[in-house]
Image: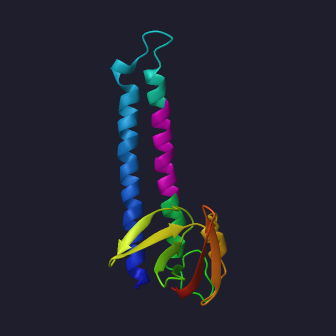
């Protein structure tokens, strides 16, 4: 796995999220300010609802910008023997199936495809992120999801 390729894909995915958020915010703003949405009586709340949606979409745009800023300093971070924010990690389950994760400062749940492999962003605030932080190569972790215990070995850290 080439970490530089993963980082390029992550940058592209973060930019795509921002673009989508901007379009949604503009659409919501246009709806909220359209003359057809002016309240005709005290029970007509369409304009108010549209304004709340526009505010939420604007916040989403801000969150995307913040996410991109948080990623900038860690993208050039050198690999370490311990997992830290900015580490690309491969876990191997008991069935020898491998899963790749990027420990990021934000954007948990974001996934990218690189050469046929899916890499998921996890944050230190997520259960898996907490377990991975400061672990080393060949360490094992156990994660319980929906009352099912999953055991993994750390087989690669980039």
What is the image's colouring?
rainbow
Where residue 54 sits in the image (x, y, percent)? 45, 36
- Residue 83 in which image quadrant: bottom right
Left or right, 53 with respect to 116, comes to: right
Where residue 40 sits in the image (x, y, percent)? 42, 10
Majority secondary structure of magenta residues: helix
Where residue 65 sits in the image (x, y, percent)? 48, 56
- Number of marks: 0
Q: What residue sits 54% from the left and 65% below the top?
A: 70
Write the start and end of the magenta stretch as one range: 52-66
Above/below status of 146 relative to 60: below
Q: What residue sits 43% from the left and 22% below the top?
A: 46
Q: What residue sits 65% from the left and 74% below the top?
A: 131
| Most foreground residue, 139 or 67 | 139
Q: Is residue 53 magenta?
A: yes
Name the residue at the top extreme: 41
- Residue 148 in which image quadrant: bottom right
Q: Is residue 122 magenta?
A: no
Above/below status of 84 relative to 139: above
Where residue 112 sits in the image (x, y, percent)? 39, 69
């Amino acid at each position: 796995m080439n970490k530089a390729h993963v980082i390029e894909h992550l940058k592209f995915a973060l930019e795509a999220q921002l673009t989508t958020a901007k379009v949604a915010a503009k659409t919501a703003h246009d709806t909220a300010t359209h003359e057809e949405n002016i309240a005709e009586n005290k029970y007509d709340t369409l304009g108010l609802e549209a304004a709340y949606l526009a505010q939420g979409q604007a916040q989403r745009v801000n969150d995307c910008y913040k996410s991109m800023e948080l990623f900038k300093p860690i993208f050039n971070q050198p690999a370490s023997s311990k997992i830290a924010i900015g580490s690309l990690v491969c876990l191997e389950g008991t069935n020898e199936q491998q899963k790749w994760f990027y420990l990021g400062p934000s954007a948990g749940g974001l996934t990218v495809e690189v050469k046929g492999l899916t890499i998921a962003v996890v944050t230190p605030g997520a259960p898996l992120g907490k377990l991975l932080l400061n672990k080393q190569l060949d360490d094992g972790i156990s994660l319980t999801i929906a009352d099912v215990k999953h055991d993994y070995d750390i087989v690669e850290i980039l």
